[in-house]
Image: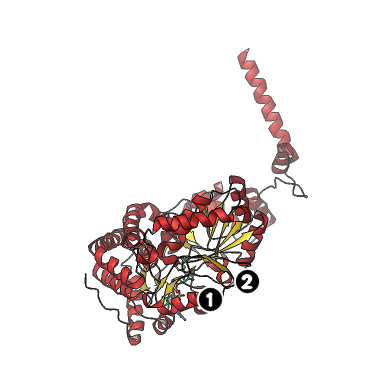
Amino acid sequence: MPELPPFEHTPIDDIASTCARVRTTFLSHKTRPLEFRIQQLRKLYWAFKDNEALVTEACKRDLGKPTFETYLTEYSWVMNDCIWMANNLPRFAKDEKPADIAFTNKFVGPRIRKDPLGTALIIGAYNFPIQLTVGPLIGAIAAGCTAIVKPSESSPHAAAILQKIISEALDPSCYTVIQGAIPETTALLDQKWDTIFYTGSENVARIIAKKAAETLTPLVLELGGRNPAIITKHADPKLAARRLLWAKTLNAGQVCVSQNCTFIDREILPAFIQEMKNTLKEFYPQGPRNSPDYGRIVNQRQFQRLKKMLDSSNGKIVIGGTMDESDLFIEPTVVQVNDISDSLVSDESFGPLLPILPVDNLDEAIKLANETHDTPLGTYAFGNKKEMEQILNQTRSGGASLNDGFFHASIPTLAFGGVGTSGQGAYRGKASFDVFTHRRSVTTTPAWLESLLDVRYPPYTLKKQKKFAGMNEMKPNFDREGRPLGWGNWLLGLLGLKGLAALIVAIGVRQYLQRRSKL
Ligand code: NAD
């Protein structure tokens, strides 16, 4: 068994000086050259490659995470990200030529530079301890920021291996890990940051947002859950059962994008429950408890929280229900609930509890889903094409997967983020670069343009205003009722009566000359 480094809290007294060091490095411009950033990303790749076994062991100890899941969702994910970002960075970092610039403004060469925001604080959650911290870190490195990473103390083994990897692979004056819980995070939040990237629960997000507001620090919030799945009577019950069960048993349901409650048409309910039972047997032939492919709850506090949630439910357990605190095991548990005030629906379960709520029709399902949480992180729709479009049209969420549970969130290059109380800002793929980047608009005014620009200087005159209006003023293509104008009226508005007459004469003369030349 590989030996893991110990998890040690960073002394609080060291935090201010570490942050100051990382900030000073940013101000020294060390992270600006693209070659430096690309080299750091490549080194990070190799550090993960060399530590795959340790990452696997750490995730196993923290979450009982199956080897396959650690490969899929942790180290292979971030290693691919390192390669992808390094390959695409020159393209992302290039100045952009903005569209929609008026002809007269083109002479000043407007462009958008991609400047790093500065020094970033990245705070992670426990459930994907590597991906949720290294994903944003890759964006920060790519953008040219310096960064401090604060992994979750609830996954201490993964936090420790992360610290080992980052300190061995990356320039320590630019990127470093601070370990700890609330006191250390509070000390971090007392420092000056140019951006904070937080992944975690809504409650803690409020604390972080208040702190960020004091210094007007930009903030990305990747929050959670209470995601609805909706199954109509036209859905395939077997497909829905397989896909939703996987989405809720991966990482033992400790996934922010898993469905929290499934609203299902009564007509299809018995078939769906039967298919859930079949699928469970197929996924875990010896039962989930004896399977190496089923994880554990992260700690006793979370175990007790989930147990209380289940104990307080008024629903009927239709599958599962067993748990063992000594092993932090909770069986995938399907509970038929009666209403959305049930303890399993009103809060985010963030575990392998699957409430299902029967409904009479799709309208009722949508209404209840919106009442439960009108801006969840994900929405999952199963039904025919028209029904799935209706679900999209009548709900809001950070992302959505049609005919699946959170597939959209498993595409590493697709922007990922919440909306409303499930978060703000997005990352992954190019969005990871963008979220740590300031788009700085730049113009360069040539000296020779002065004769044209003269118009802006005092003393202001009516003549200057008219000249300016001639260069600048737009003509409406709509009337006073907001109705679009026909092209004749629009031209009249644009050119005026005289201009329009001149245009008609010019066209007439042109046609006359063309006809004569053919004769
Ligand atoms: P959490 O909010 O308890 O902890 C997240 C981080 O905040 C940790 O690093 C922790 O040390 C720190 N923290 C905790 N209390 C704090 C305080 N009082 N002051 C300052 N910092 C504090 O979240 P968690 O339990 O690790 O993760 C579960 C939550 O995260 C769920 O709600 C889940 O939906 C959400 N989540 C969201 C995403 C996403 O990408 N949107 C991903 C994973 C998890």
Query: Looking at the rendering, which quadrant does residue 227 occupy?
Result: bottom right
- Residue at x 46% of width, y 50% of height: 97
- 105 or 234, which lies in front? 234
Q: Position of residue 256 (x, y in %)?
A: 47, 66
Q: Position of residue 467 (x, y in %)?
A: 64, 50
Q: What colour scheme was applied to this rendering of the protein?
A: secondary structure
**220 left or right of 491?**
left
Amino acid type shown at disc 2: Ser
Real-space CA distance between mark 2 and mark 1, rounded to the nearest whole angstrom: 14 Å
- Image quarter (top left, top right, bottom left or bottom right) of the N terminus: bottom left
Q: Which mark is residue 341?
A: 2
Q: Which mark is residue 330?
A: none
Answer yes or no: is residue 18 visible: yes
Pointer 1 residue: 311
Q: Position of residue 143 (x, y in %)?
A: 38, 62
Amino acid type shown at disc 1: Asp
- For residue 159, above or below residue 84: below
Q: Position of residue 325 (x, y in %)?
A: 40, 77
Q: Earlier in the sequence, mark 2 or mark 1?
A: 1
- 273 or 499, which lies in front? 273
Answer yes or no: is residue 136 visible: no
Report ligand 1 position as a quadrant.
Answer: bottom left
- Residue at x 64% of width, y 63% of height: 368
